[in-house]
Image (cartoon, helix red, strand yellow):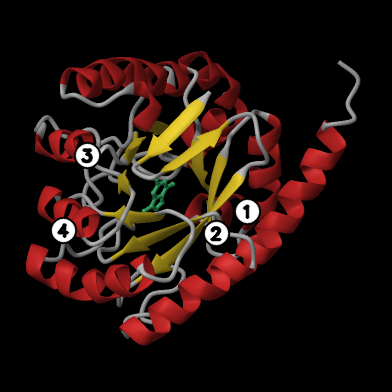
Amino acid sequence: MLLRARQFSFVFPRPAMIMGIVNVTPDSFSDGGEFLEPRKAVAHALKLVEEGAEIIDIGGESTSPGAVPVSESDELQRIMPVVEQLAGKLKVPISVDTMKPGVARAALAAGASIVNDVAANRPDESMWRIVAEASAGYVCMHMQGTPQTMQSNPVYNDVVGEVGNFFFERIKRLNDCGMTPEQIILDPGIGFGKTLEHNLQLLAGLQDFARFERPLLLGVSRKSFMGKLLGTNAEGRLPAALACACLAVEARAQIIRAHDVAETVQAVRMAEAILARRKK
Ligand code: 9MG
């Protein structure tokens, strides 16, 4: 299985890639406000790469439940200095975490290689045409609703089946917009319009998505459903995040999105070493 993202290409199976998170926001749930200054965001990205991140995901708008939307010009002001500086420094792909086609276009022009689109459920095609035109990688994430509405009353009859149907239908639409299958990464969107039970069912059913033969990305870093199960706050959820990451790798997830890169690399490499010795 091949993943192409502009000048980058990756062949799977290979060790899972860790996508390091750099939130250039005042209000993200785990690191909000820490990296608003471009100098600090750039230094943090370089540190995450040293720790083993193979993709850096830069975001200028929080997608936490109920987050206040930001304007395109504010989002650009936050992320562009960071993308521009990192583009000349990093040897790993820069991913831009944005729901706005205009922000994606500007970030790709400045050297980003992947668009991480949590709003892949939108009907409008303009984002997909921009990504297709740039031959960039595209994270097609499932969400029910929008960050503002998604946690008010998420409902599914069969969450794994419905997310699978979404992937099936979107892959076809992305192809119709000129994207090749090799550009597409799938993500079930843990925490995006899902209850604790939905998240647990998705994590238990990840293997079902292997049939699409596309890399599977999973974001389980310190998310609030862990607090609902375990009663821990965001700072105390690293062990739960590592458990989810290792089980996801066992279920053949290929990309793990994480705040705690060094710890996630260590946990995932350990899991992979054991899995490689499992009798078939
Ligand atoms: C931006 N963001 C926050 N959580 C995420 C997740 O689970 N997946 C992706 N692709 N992006 C996320």
Of labels 2 and 4, the one closer to you: 4
Q: Amino acid at mark 3?
A: Val
N-term mark: 4 or 1: 4
Circle 2 — which element?
A: loop
> Residue drawn 82% across and 32% down?
275
Q: Which mark is residue 106?
A: 4
Precedes in sequence: disc 1 or disc 2: 2
Q: Residues within 10 Å of mark 3 (few under 14, many from 20)?
A: many
Identify residue for label 2.
222
Q: Earlier in the sequence, mark 2 or mark 4?
A: 4
Per the model, the C-alpha gap separating discs 4 and 1 is 32 Å
Vertical relation: 48 (above or below) 38: above
Please give left or right for residue 140 compared with residue 100 in the image. right
Q: CA distance from mark 1 to mark 2?
A: 6 Å
Residue 57 lies, in percent from the top left, at 40, 58
Q: Residue at x 33, y 75 (%)?
A: 85
* Left or right for 118, reference 235: left
Earlier along the polypeptide chain: callout 4 or callout 3? 4
Q: Amino acid at mark 1?
A: Ala
Closest to the observer, 28 or 276: 276
Residue at mark 3: 131
Instruction: Assess whether mark 2 and mark 1 are in contact (beta carbons under 8 angstroms).
Output: yes
Circle 2 residues within 10 Å: few <14, some 14–19, many ≥20: many
Q: Are marks 1 and 3 in contact (CB under 8 Å)?
A: no
Numbered tag placed on residue 241 in the rendering: 1
Q: Is residue 233 visible?
A: no
Q: Nearer the viewer, mark 4 or mark 1?
A: 4
Instruction: Out of 158 and 11, give the one closest to the viewer.
Output: 11
The residues bearing labels 1 and 3 have C-alpha atoms spaced at a distance of: 30 Å
